[in-house]
Image: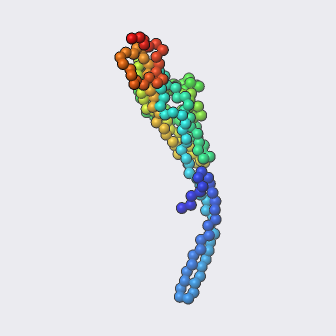
Amino acid sequence: MVVPPSGTNSTDLITLTISSSEGASTTSAGETLTVTATAGVVPPSFSGPTTFYGGVSVTLSSLGASPVGGDTLGTNATFTGLSAGWTLIDTNSTSSFTGTSITRDTVLDLGSLVVVAPSGTTSASDLLTLTIPSSLAEPQRAGSEVLTLVAQHYTSLSGNLTGANLTGADLSSADLSG
């Protein structure tokens, strides 16, 4: 097996020599072979957090994907696993999507996506899998990342909340008295 340096294509010459002997006679022959090794496709690199917090809506800000080693990102991002009642919104086009498998051409602007929790939700979470293909010429290979969405929208809080995780919670209309 010939493996090129990481992330590159490479051509090299290899000389193959075969010897044979019979009795007192020995002979050999050689052939020079040209070997070309092509680097494989590497899945994209994801950036940003994997857990997103919000109130009624959860913004996927700081989420991104980049090609690795000279590869090219595919044009479509696929989101799977969005639970019933949750809605994915592309704030650039104002399009909204529901369903368990959503394909969007938003790879270059993933941070403009917002996920809205089901109506009437005070606290909910969901898991969403983002898959983006990358390619180097023809072959494609996809990378995936699981995103955790946490929506917290409270209108009242009571009791001892010591240790409660209210990160990103919408408390704008909450009664905090007592």
Q: In the rendered image of this protein, does residue 20 appear above or below residue 72?
A: below
In this view, the residue in front, 65 or 142, is: 65
Q: Which residue is rendered at x = 56% and y = 48% of the image?
A: 41
Q: Which residue is rendered at x = 59% and y = 51% of the image?
A: 7
Residue lying farthest to the left in this orientation: 159
Quick one: quadrant of the N terminus? bottom right
Q: Quadrant of residue 123?
A: top left
Q: How is the image coloured?
A: rainbow
Picture coordinates of residue 61, whole percent (x, y) = 55, 28
Q: Is residue 94 visible?
A: yes
Residue lying farthest to the bottom in this orientation: 24
Q: In the rendered image of this protein, does residue 17 appear above or below residue 136?
A: below
Q: In the rendered image of this protein, does residue 1 appear above or below residue 84?
A: below
Q: Which residue is rendered at x = 55% and y = 47% of the image?
A: 42
Total marks shown come to: 0
Q: Which residue is rendered at x = 44% and y = 26% of the image?
A: 150
Left or right of residue 55: residue 94? right
Picture coordinates of residue 22, whole percent (x, y) = 53, 85
Picture coordinates of residue 158, whole percent (x, y) = 37, 15
Picture coordinates of residue 67, whole percent (x, y) = 59, 42
In this view, the residue in front, 101 or 148, is: 148
Q: Is residue 119 visible?
A: no
Quick one: quadrant of the C terminus? top left
